[in-house]
Image: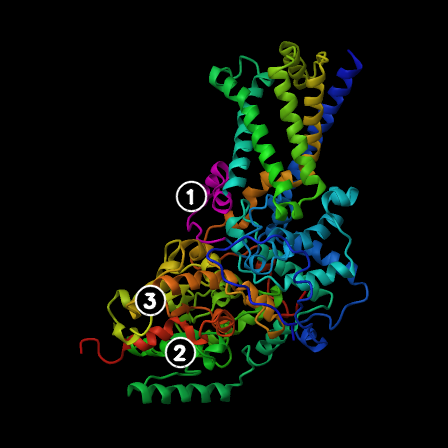
Amino acid sequence: MAAKFETPTLKEYIEIPHVHPGAMAESKSYAAKPEHNTALGFPGELVENWEQVAVMKLGDLVSKSRALQVFLDSCVKCGACTDKCHYYLGTSDPKNMPVARQDLLRSVYRRYYTTAGKLFPKLVGARDMTKDVLDEWYNYYHQCSQCRRCSVFCPYGIDTAEISMAARDIMDAVGVGQKYSNEIIGKVHRIGNNLGLPEPALADTLEGLEEDVKDETGVDVKYPLDVKGADVLLITPSADFFAEPHVDGLIGYGKVFHAAGISWTLSSHASEAANFSMFIGSHANLKKQAMRIREAALDLGVKRIIVGECGHAWRVAYSFWNTLIGPFDFLDRRYPVPQHICEFTYDLIQRGALRFDKSANDDKVVTFHDSCNVARASRMGDMPGGQFIIPRAVVQASVNKFVDMAPETIGEATFCCGGGGGLLTDELMEVRVKGAMPRMQALREVVEQHGVTHIAAICAICKAQFTKILPYYEFPMDMIQSVHGLVSKAIRLGPVNE
Amino acid sequence: MSAVTVIYVVLFYVATAIFLAGLARKVYVYARTPQPLKIPTTPAPTTRAGVWMRMAREVTVFESLFKSNKWIWLFGWIFHFALLLAFFRHLRYAITPESFLWPFVSLELVQTAGKYGGYAMVIGLLGLLGRRIVVDRVRYISSPSDFLMLLLLLGIAGSGLMMTFVSHTDIVALKAFLLGLMLFDWQPLPASAPLLIHLGLVVVLMIVFPFSKLLHAPGVFFSPTRNQVDNPREQRWVAGWSAEPPTSGRAG
């Protein structure tokens, strides 16, 4: 376990800390065991000529990615990003400033692949690939949630997530994997979801949900699994099957499908929307994980694919599925492929197909947390920024009292929950708590000024992270809600014209 | 021809060759390297025209930088704008009155703006240098080369101002020298200290350009987070490894 640490105090506004070198140097996530690495096609442990392998892998990645080519050359170290990372703001460790985090890798790139770095390493800050450098990579590239907040503010659009993914890919290539991510990806390859829930356990869970909803509403809402010929295949993070508040979201999706009279199904083969292969930058694993979803869609003969509430899963689905596992010419092209559950619900609301009794949520004053991968890496609807408008519209259809947090902390500038990108693991609790500080600061402001009682999110990681983090900042842990949990409470089941 | 003239003639040819070849090579590499996945930073335009607009705002008014930090934006934008003014002012040394650009370059306004733009350039550069020294987190990320780059540009601006406001150079002879360079009909270079320093530093700048962070100039146009259209659902995107046929699914 991590050493004891102090939860940051929330100030009136965010103060940019002075640099405190080495503040987070001790915070490391557990290393993957050999079997976790080999299951993904990586060497089990640190290979013998690892320096050479790492440098070769770096060159290979750069030659295959225009993003890396441009990002590694272009940084002028202007400092615009230095105060943009929530981990720097919360920890004051200067290596958590985006430019410094990138430079951990850039310094090695300079040394081996640029004229200036070969000739004058000291002058341009170029370093040899040493064990110290590798350790530093392991430490600080696992203190990056790949939230891309820095990429919004960089004058050249340099995206630390791309560099962090490349660094992790290189570390995997030399046999230094991270336990949390690699073990999970292995479970998806083997069983189909992050939690390792086999088909019978899924079926049981869904049956239990049906009973619960029947008890609560008196209505037979179905939570179908592996139903061939259903219209919609729902792909959702496996946390939705049992974690709180995630499961309220799943209950909500079922109610929306029921109210709309649209047949749907989950798949035991593709029972996971999350794709942690993105976090470790592994193209082959990214594709392999996603491929289960295409297979399930074809096997079940569905017409549409809808993705549940999960941030990076939506990024992978929205931005990468068509590339990796498309074309989706076997689906109904009258609908976006894939479609987000919020887009789906929003369309039904627009068409007047759903009825709500907002007063069911009158015990709540709700604010909305834009999850980073949705906000800065994806879209909903047909206009830029639809990803901000649509989830809010769904929340506002379900609750009477809604308040937004400060504009500079939401939308494209949203502060990360502090737990994304493969950091949602107990040994990184200090990083997670400190990294959540800017989000908690903005939350406290609306709690004090507007009496906000709940924060809604559409990302499984945000929900799991907030459940753990909120109590550190003296907020109740059940403050965090699923957007479709709110929908679930307010939606009226039964005929529309009743 | 004096030794000084010969040295500067050679330096200019070498520097120009390194500058052009180095830059062309980098632009070729950027253009040729595929971007296998769509990674625009949203909210991003959904059309090509929208992307052009976004890029135009980035390179003219530094939109993203304006969002991030008003001080860096102010000093950075002043410097770059002054650079543009100085470029127009300097054009008259490199073109003849027959050029279609001449009526524009010879405008009193362009010449005056360029003249006083030199001061703005120094103010911008001093501001950026000051941040590097005073702000601890910017100091932390700075390499020696980051300081040297600013000092080099300050040297160029300072020596240029010297010639304009303190010790005038024989401008007619200078123009003859520069036109001679381009027409391979070499003319003597006026031997005044500020001019030799000014031109010497410009030569250094041209040589380091393709090997330094100055590559942000062409790089920004190739940045996928800024130049990609946000339409992955509407149009299937494949490039590089994402276009390769599926392999066994093993990592590699």
Q: Chain of mark 1?
A: B
Q: Nearer the viewer, mark 3 or mark 1?
A: 3
SS under mark 1: helix
Residues A309 and A425: in front is A425
Circle 1 residue: B49
The spot of residue A26 in percent (x, y) is: 69, 66
- The Cα atoms of the two marked residues, 1 and 2, are separated by 42 Å
Helix, strand or loop at label 2? It is helix
Query: How many C-alpha atoms fall within 10 Å of the one at disc 2: few (<14), some, or many (≥20)?
Result: many
Q: Secondary structure at mark 3?
A: helix
The quadrant where residue A435 appears: bottom right
Look at label 1 and name its amino acid.
Answer: Ala
Regarding residue B100, the answer to whether it shows in the image is no
> Residue A394 shows which numbered tag?
3
Which three-letter amino acid code belongs to the residue tagged 2?
Asp
**Along the viewing direction, whichever of A38 and B117 lies nearer the viewer:** B117
Q: Which mark is residue A248?
A: 2
* First in sequence: mark 3 vs mark 2: 2
Viewed as shown, does residue A182 lie left or right of B55?
right
Residue B73 position in % (x across, y down): 52, 39
Residue A49 can be seen in this image: yes
User: Height in image: A65 above or below A249?
Assistant: above
Which corner quadrant holds the N terminus of chain A?
Answer: bottom right
Q: Is residue A372 magenta?
A: no
Q: Which residues are magenta?
A: B41-69
